[in-house]
């Protein structure tokens, strides 16, 4: 379902993130900021899906051109490499068993500063068939799901 809100994309994204517990909100805001700096020309593709909030970064508005994304869940945030199976991973950082994607669970936004993750990000950019602009990135709300799993952790199950 395409987003039809008259709010700006920035306000919509802030609202999506606000649904999460404070620690997850802080992590995703900081990680998103670091990725925006890393990819200043990226088109940020946002999906507020049934299972998670996904914020992709790619050189175009096409989802298939996205390189990485943040997948936000109630208890953790993954840095997802959409073509992760093609990336060199000497540090054995990447997890997952899908046919294409791999991910790293972010313990904190500082993980994006780790040399192994910077190397993975560099490799993902080199692997991309479409080059990123040097500046001028923007955000598009691609979809929002009317029905969603809870975004906060139930205090009784912590």
Image (tube, rainbow, N blue to C red):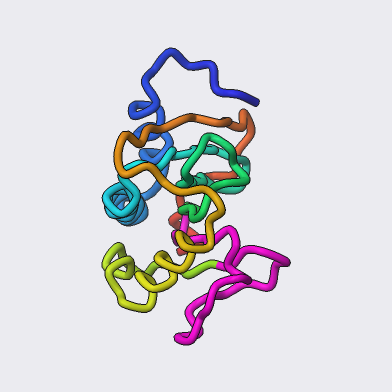
Residue at the (43%, 38%) spot, across then down: 43
Q: Is residue 24 above or below residue 116?
A: above
Residue 6 coordinates in the image, percent (x, y): 43, 13
Q: Residue furthest right?
A: 99
Q: Is residue 105 above or below residue 91?
A: above
**Res 73 seen here:** no
Residue 52 coordinates in the image, percent (x, y): 55, 47
Q: Is residue 105 left or right of residue 134?
A: right
Residue at the (49%, 55%) spot, across then down: 68
Residue nearest the viewer, comparing 50 with 143: 143
Q: Is residue 62 left or right of residue 37?
A: right
Residue nearest the viewer, comparing 49 with 131: 131
Q: Quadrant of the N terminus?
A: top right
Residue 24 coordinates in the image, percent (x, y): 36, 54
Residue 26 coordinates in the image, percent (x, y): 28, 52
User: Was residue 84 drawn as part of the magenta stretch in this picture?
Assistant: yes
Residue at the (64%, 33%) spot, across then down: 147
**Res 9 seen here:** yes
Instruction: Give the extent of the magenta segment.
Output: 74-102
**Residue 38 figure quarter:** bottom left
Dominant SS type (magenta): loop
């Amino acid at each position: 379902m395409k987003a039809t809100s008259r709010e700006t994309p920035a306000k919509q994204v802030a609202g999506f993130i606000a649904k999460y517990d404070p620690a997850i909100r802080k992590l995703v805001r900081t990680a998103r900021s670091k990725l925006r700096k890393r990819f200043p020309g990226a088109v940020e593709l946002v999906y507020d899906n049934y299972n998670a909030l996904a914020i992709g970064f790619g050189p175009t508005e096409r989802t298939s051109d996205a390189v990485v994304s943040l997948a936000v869940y109630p208890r953790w945030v993954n840095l997802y490499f959409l073509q992760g199976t093609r990336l060199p991973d000497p540090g054995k950082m990447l997890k997952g068993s899908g046919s294409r994607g791999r991910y790293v669970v972010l313990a904190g936004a500082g993980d994006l500063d780790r040399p192994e993750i910077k190397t993975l990000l560099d490799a993902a950019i080199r692997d991309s068939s479409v080059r990123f602009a040097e500046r001028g990135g923007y955000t598009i709300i691609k979809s929002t799901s009317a029905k969603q799993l809870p975004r906060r952790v139930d205090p009784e199950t912590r």
